[in-house]
Image: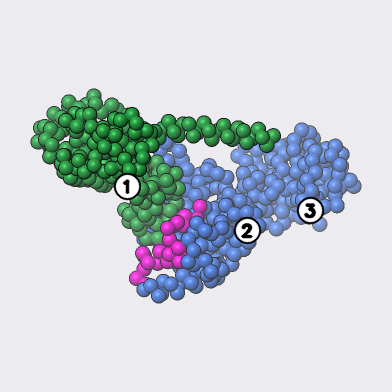
Chain colours: A green, B blue
Amino acid sequence: MINETRRSRFLLYAGLGVFALFALTPYFWVVRTSLLTNFAAINPETGYLPALDALTLTAYTDIWNQFDFVTFFRNSLIVSISATLISLVFSIPGAYAFARLDFPGRKLLFYTAVFTIMFPWIVITIPVYEVFYVFGLINTLPGIIIALSIFVLPQTIWLLQGFFRQGIPENIEEAALIDGHTEIGAFLRIVLPLSAPAVGAAALFSFLTAWNNFLWVFVLTSDADVRTATVAIHFILGSDVLREWNILMAAVVLLVAPPVVFYGLSQRYVGEGLGGA
Amino acid sequence: MARVEFDNITKVFEDTSGPIIAVEELSLDIPDGEFVVFVGPSGCGKSTTLRMLAGLETITDGEVRLNGEPVNDISPRDRDIAMVFQSYALYPHKTVRGNMGYGLDLSTDLNDEEVDRRVVEAAEMMGIEDLLDKKPGSLSGGQQQRVATGRAIVREPAVFLFDEPLSNLDAQLRKHMRTELSRIHSELGITTIYVTHDQEEAMTMADRIVILNDGQLQQVGSPKQVYYRPANTFVADFIGSPSMNFFDVDLEVASDGTGTLVGNGFTYSVSDSLVDLVGGDGEYILSIRPENLNVDPSAPSERSFEATVDVVEVIGSDNFIYLDVAGKECRLRAPSETEPEEGDVITVSFDEADLHLFDRNTEEALVHGHERAESTPKVIEQEA
């Protein structure tokens, strides 16, 4: 009996191990290649685990010198943080209204918002471009910020309303009303502090969605100086570094680093927020 | 300190399936300092009524007055009330001290020291002074309940509202808190409205009990009044545990004026005074409490009936005997030494002074046999 339990447990972990290896190998390969010289990256003798003295940061210094990454990252940060803040400013009261208030058209509005999450954005690129063109927002950072805020908003509303609905008992707000708060006061002073985990989770998702967004930035910009890092990588891939795998992979690592850091900072809250606790 | 008046209040909830009447034309006057318990089954409108008084629910029609002032359009914070919720509704991010002092901070100009002094005082009253610096999450249910009550006490409001505050506690703690809340009420003398679905809680705590069903007021009265003189079959059934026995009976008056109640499975001779009170032949509902039924083999046959024992539940102090009377269940509460076997046929009798008669159509009370009750409805004079 014991043997059987052990064997099935061993098989389970072996299976999980294979699966994890399969999932993690591409990420390992990206980091490995970014730390090699261009020659070593394509040399079959380098091996899966390159020797320590073969590792170098030249790809990173090359790419930093070759392209205007400072601008790209600055744009990405401005755009992602602004879009996150703007979407939170609108989605927190919006989600609260959807969760708590009963107003005409509540369901219709809510399902419209949820529907836009599922809607394939690529279908509406041309009309969106037209609208932004009319308002003179093409090739501007405010244009990108507005676009990303709008497209991030439904997902944030959806996430937060679930938390407000289930995570905060109505009686707590009622107790605050009796204790002497107005409805707005009860929301700001009691509900919002209790919602920090959910707001953190919503902020993280907004930031990631905005940071990783390719489509809208690509459609709404053509000048290099308003490009975000995500779109810049696309152009770098198509430029004269086409065969320089180490540089391409270094670009990818740089692109991914900020969201990972951001996640690391907020993950303490995020788990709680998603758990609805 | 406040007098609370409900003047013909109605609450209608709009639902997709149509309007739902939660409370219908309820009128009630609660004098200053009274402990009133609203009791009724789930969905009877008791919590809705309380929430309308608190200002957490709008009032569809009618007027609620506090000390004579209409409060329909006054926000909860300006009503000078404090409420204890079933879920306690403590602020999880504040300490016990913070929870208790929050209302004072917001609604009064007291300085921090004064607030703290009152918080400590209320905490001592509730026996939670050791918990002041803890967060609600680390407290047991009973402790949270005390904090919630303490938070209400510290406000020294005009009215205390309790919405099923003890429902989440275990039986023993519930009984303990019951006495404690009664003690606090007698110490502070603040008007208290308490909502519960537990008739035992209502009986033990209330000065007056308000019984609601389907949004309609059934009866208002002292615990003794609603127990001995239920206004209708609903109240009779709801108050008392195990609940009352009901039998459909016909009163047959013989030519010599003697009356007999004839039901399915038994006949019972009644006195002339009872016949006079109900006014002759007719269809009634006879009801009798389980504790008023006796197992009495020597009872005269015209004042007893035979029943088969279905189940005997041993409680310790008493035995609950479930009987079959011509296919209808009948409950009897007997002393613990009376313990018939299942299937036994026993003779059951009761005193005429303990019976209640209700109109079979309206289900309103006609006669209460009990001497302990006062007038209206009619009461049988005891025969010497």
**Residue at (24%, 42%) from the top-left corner?**
A58
- Residue for badge 2: B173
Q: Nearer the viewer, residue B217 or A111?
A: A111
| Residue A56 left/right relative to B186 | left
Q: What amino acid is found at the position of numbered circle 2 in the picture?
A: Leu
- Residue for badge 1: A261
User: Could one spot residue A181 in this view of the protein?
Assistant: yes
Asked which quadrant contains residue A141, the reply is: top left
For marks 2 and 3, give the CA distance.
Answer: 21 Å
- Is residue B107 part of the magenta span, yes or no? yes
- Residue for badge 3: B316
Q: What amino acid is found at the position of numbered circle 1 in the picture?
A: Val
Q: Nearer the viewer, residue B147 or B36?
A: B147
Location of residue B124 in the rendering, given as x and y in whole percent from the top left corner: 53, 71
**Residue at (69%, 40%) from the top-left corner?**
B285
Are labels 1 and 3 on one chain? no
Disc 2 is attached to a residue of which chain? Answer: B
Could you tell me if the residues under marks 2 and 1 are in contact, i.e. CB atoms within 8 Å?
A: no
Location of residue B130 in the rendering, given as x and y in whole percent from the top left corner: 53, 69
Q: Is residue A142 above or below residue B327?
A: below
Q: Nearer the viewer, residue B31 or B22?
A: B22
Asked which quadrant contains residue A166, the reply is: top left
Location of residue B170 in the rendering, given as x and y in whole percent from the top left corner: 63, 54
For marks 2 and 1, give the CA distance.
Answer: 50 Å
Disc 1 is attached to a residue of which chain? Answer: A
Q: Is residue B261 above or below residue A234?
A: below
**Residue at (16%, 42%) from the top-left corner?**
A65
